Image (cartoon, rainbow, N blue to C red):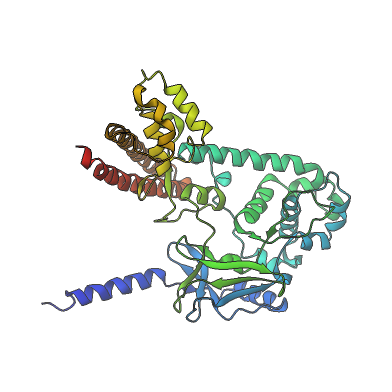
Amino acid sequence: MKKGRGRTSRIRRRKLFRSSVSRGVSESYKPEFIELKKWLKDRKFEDTNLIPACFPGTGRGLMSKTSLREGQMIISLPESCLLTTDTVIRSYLGAYIAKWQPPPSPLLALCTFLVSEKHAGDQSLWKPYLEILPKAYTCPVCLEPEVVNLFPKPLKAKAEEQRAHVQGFFSSSRDFFSSLQPLFSEAVESIFSYSALLWAWCTVNTRAVYVEHRQRQCLSTEPNTYALAPYLDLLNHSPDVQVKAAFNEETRCYEIRMASSCRKHEQVFICYGPHDNQRLLLEYGFISIQNPHACVYVSEDILVKYLPSTDKQMNKKISILKDHDFIENLTFGWDGPSWRLLTALKLLCLEADEFTCWKKILLGEIISDANEKRSLVIAQKICQYFIEETNAMLRKVSHMKDEEVALINQLTLVETLWTEELKILQASAEILNRLQTPFR
């Protein structure tokens, strides 16, 4: 046997490959991180467990300096480092917020502070933190309309809602911004532009951690639970990890503990929640490869696409599904069609003489082999329809990448989403094929 061709050698190469993929390159030497470290130290925080690094696939994150054990505290960030509405109210903006009616929302207070401090540049006390924040975001609200048009329909609808929400947020805040004119030598319209507020909104929406604050009379009654956490917010998301993260009222620190071990020089992750890729892209502007929570949504029009148009009970069946909350969140996942999707299809596939059994369907009972077979056949047809649609969209995106070079990063993001959905659909198609075997 030639050297390096055996089983042991293959295992060693796989380990080396995994190590090279997960291994980061330290960025702690960069000026912005040196300044951030000094700034944090002045606020009573000095990290001994983690260092900033750049990783393949995820970009900038935090890397372990030593092996980390389960239950170990990895970050304990003092309250003095957190940027909250209390920070804003104690600042030069406090008097303006206090006298404005109706009271500004906590979100508006934070966004206003971020825009103002960014405008202050070197004069800002928060400059070391602002310097490491992204200069731009990839949330759908920041993407070009022609890119958003390439999204799956459910995500496209939510993205358009998000854009309308942020535009409304900006329009309704203009009068408040005008009241701040005495603080600036330049016209507030040039400082608090839509692009500036969009950047601030994305910063809070994608990076804030949950910390409850006492209700302030000078702020609206909307939830006041945002806190920007410098350094801590460099931690990237992984759906496969668990950490314990919360603000400790006794220590007055935001603390993160490991729920599993981590080897030296590996990237340390946190989990933002059990979100599918469409939710991750909508809220955070990224996609998680091989995300166990990823799924493909089936809308009502596709649900009935392959059912007989002659079914006189169809409207009644749809009404029952709506009344019992079985018309939304119907999905294909890595483990095939969801129970909710198959249940909805079983009810829709009931023959006229079986219709009185619809309650048993919703309870998970089997009505007949024929009903089981019909629902699986329809599920297979829907899955195949999505596979064809997804392949068509991937071809369209590929063509646009050749034509629209300036949008290549945004288009690559969309391409990644569709590619992941195609893998899910192909896995579901295989599972459906196996499920139909007993009925052939």
The quarter of the rendered structure image containing the N terminus is: bottom left
Pinpoint residue 328: horizontal percent, then vertical percent.
Answer: 49, 37
Asked whether 239 or 303 is in front, the reply is 303
Q: Which quadrant would residue 211 be assigned to in this image? A: bottom right
**From this viewpoint, is residue 282 visible?**
yes
Asked whether 47 or 429 is in front, the reply is 429
Q: Residue at x 71, y 43 (%)?
A: 170
Q: Is residue 431 left or right of residue 292?
A: left
Q: Residue at x 71, y 78 (%)?
A: 44
Q: Is residue 150 left or right of residue 125?
A: left
Q: Is residue 4 left or right of residue 12?
A: left
Q: Residue at x 38, y 27 (%)?
A: 305
Above or below residue 65? Residue 369 is above
Above or below residue 328? Residue 268 is below
Pinpoint residue 331: horizontal percent, then vertical percent.
Answer: 42, 42
Pinpoint residue 364: horizontal percent, then vertical percent.
Answer: 40, 41
The quarter of the rendered structure image containing the C terminus is: top left
